Every structure is written in structure tokens, then in C-alpha cells.
Image (tube, grey):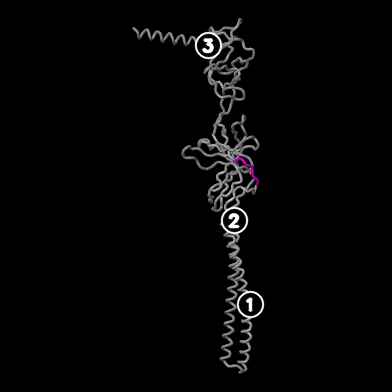
Amino acid sequence: MKLNKRLILISAAIGIGVILIVMFVVSSFKISPGLEKVSGIKRDIPSNTARAEIKTITEWYEAVGTVRPHTEIRIEAQVTAQVTDVKVNHGDKVEKNQLLVVLDSRQFLSRLDQAREGLKIANAAKKKASQAKISAQAAMSEAASAYKRTKTYFESQAATAQDLEQSESAFLQAQAGLNQAEESLTATAAGIRHAEEVIKEAEFALEYTKIKAPETGEVLKRLVEPGDLALPGKPLVILQASGALRLEANVREGMISQIGPGTKLQASIDPQDDNIDVTVEEIVPYADPETRTFIVKVSLPMDIGLYPGMYGKLLIPVEEVRIVAIPQSAVKQIGQLELVSVKVDEIWTIRYIKTGKKIDGLVEVLSGLSGNEIIGLEG
């Protein structure tokens, strides 16, 4: 018995709640004498009207992406050394060949001094070898003349066979000495060239301790501080080269066959209000095995207030669809309810609708209207 009473009380409470909600909805509309009446709900006659349109629109696939520099340069060290100074900070504008990072150069200066000392030694050895060659040439010339005379004397029986043999031996020794001197001179010349190459390498290494900007641009990231150890392959500064940005979006594999390099599309970039015309530059020919998406890179116009790291969407057309659309000002929002005034047989009534996308001042009506209805505008 008590249970039945409780059920009766709960039902009564629910009924009262429904009545209150209806009264709230009805009271939200203006009521005054001379109003038209439909189903017990009175509604002002709107002063401005419009017609529900049937429009053909393009359905878009939205691929989420990020704005990135068209050219992003990773500045790395070419030698291993300690960082002594960093000349730039995040957001700094830099010119081509501007000094960015300074490394400890002491070991490279020492190596250069040693290389230069090696060149001096090689030059001294060459000078000594040149003098030895001159002496060997003189000895060779003298031995050749003596051998020639002895041979003449021998033919006229003025010299013995032993004299000729001794003269020939001296000549051959002088010739061997000259050959040896020439080889030594050639070796010293090679030593000089090697020393010069070592100097060049030492100069290059020393120059690598002054890391400069390869292009004019802007510093995106500063990744080192004085005292850090710079290593080849370890980025020190990330630089954005001057020029246009681009959007890198992740496009699902089912859509990738519809686009290619040169395809004209649209992109939506926060905080831009309007869509931007873009062109596909590159499609990375590798799908992410986890997300089944491809990276598509599209060029963005210059000087439109965009910055690297911004959120963006690449819009790819899917199909043409027909929708019912009405002005946004025709919709009255009450909590979660969406209402419009509709003229039916010269009488204005209230109708519940469900809306979808907003399109150029209009709103898509998903249910509640079929198109061509006359509707009232709020305000």
C-alpha cells in the first residue's frame, strides 16, 4: 500500500516537472494581445522572415596536422669540443654567416701550430735535398768526364784496363748518388704537400669551432648552454630559414589515392577564420603502421600571420551532399533545445529542430525541416 502511494507521488512529481518545462519553453517566447495560436502555444508574428534553403555542399575529410617551417635547419657541431659561448636565443632573427655558437678552440690552435711547424721541417728537408742533388749532379758530371777521358786513353793504349775499370766504377757511383738525391728531393716535396694538407685540415677544424648560420632565418630552439659538450650529430640550434611555411597533415590511407603532388586543396589554420588555398608539395611514401596514415605536406602562403607549431587541418573533398540550411539568427536556443518559428497555413508555430554544421552565416538542419519552409528570424 505504501509502495503504491510512493509511485503515485513520484508520477505526480514527474507530471508537474513536465508541465513546468513546457511552461518555461512557452514563457520564453513573447506573448501579447493579437497573437496567433496553434495547439495552445502562442507565438509573435515575426517581423523578418526567411526560407529554409536546400543547398548542395561539399563534405570534407579533415586531416589534422601541424604548421612547420618549409626549411628547418639543424645546426650541429662538426668537431668534438666544449661550448664556450652561445650567441643567440629562441626567436632571434639571424643573418647568413652570423655567429651562433663558439666552441673551445685551444686544442685546434695547438694542432695548427704543430702542422705549421711540420711544414717548416719539410721545407728545410727539401732545401737540403736540393743542395744534395746539386752536389750529386756536379759529381756525376765530373765522373762522366773522367770516364770519357779514360776510355779515350784506353783506346789509344795510354791507360790500362784497370784505369778504365776504376773510372767506370766512379761514374756509376756518381750516377747512383744523383738518382738517390733526386728521390730524396721528390720525397721532401711529397712531405711538403702532406704538411700543407695537415695545415688545411687544422684550419678547417679551427674554423668549425665558430658555428655560423648557413641561411638567414629565425632561431626556433636553442639546445645548448656554455659548458655543454658539443658532439658531431648532436643538434645545437634549430633554425627556421626565411620563407613560406607548410602544413604537415596525417591523411588516412583510404584517402591518399585522391591526392598527389600539385593537387589544389584547402586548409584551416587556427586562428585563421577563413580557409586557405594550399597545394600539395610532397607525400611521404610510407604509412605509419599504428595510425595507418600518410604525412602529406602542403605549401602555405607567406605573410598570413602563421607560426611553426600551430594546429591546422587539411580539408580533402569527399562527396557532394544536399542539405537544408537556415540563417543562424532563426534558431532560438533554450538549454539543449533548438527551436524555430515556422509558418504553416498562414499560422506561425514553434518547431523543434536539430542543427549541424555552420556554413557562411547559415546552419545545417539535420531534422525538423524538409526545405522551403518560411521561418521567422529572431531579433
Q: Which residues are magenta?
A: 90-95
Q: Residues within 10 Å of mark 2 (few under 14, many from 20)?
A: many
Circle 3 crowding by C-alpha within 10 Å: few under 14, some 14–19, many from 20: few
- Name the image quarter holding the C terminus: top right
From what the image shows, is residue 319 above or below residue 299?
Answer: above
Image position of 40 with respect to 354: above or below = above
Distance from label 3 to label 2 (Cα)?
82 Å
Between label 2 and label 1, give the one nearer the viewer.
Answer: 2
Closer to us: 304 or 45: 304
Asked whether 188 or 107 is in front, the reply is 107
| Image quadrant occupied by the N terminus | top left
Give the residue type at disc 1: Ile
Residue mark closest to the camera, 3 vs 2: 2
Residue, x 59% and y 87% (percent of image)? Answer: 167
Q: Which mark is residue 97?
A: none
Q: From the top left corner, tell me how far across and down residue 364 is, in percent.
A: 57, 22
Report if the CB atoms under discs 3 and 1 are less than 8 Å apart: no
- Give the residue pinned by disc 1: 134
> Measured along the vertical axis of the image, is residue 104 above or below residue 284?
below
Disc sitting over residue 206 in the figure:
2
Q: Quadrant of residue 159?
A: bottom right
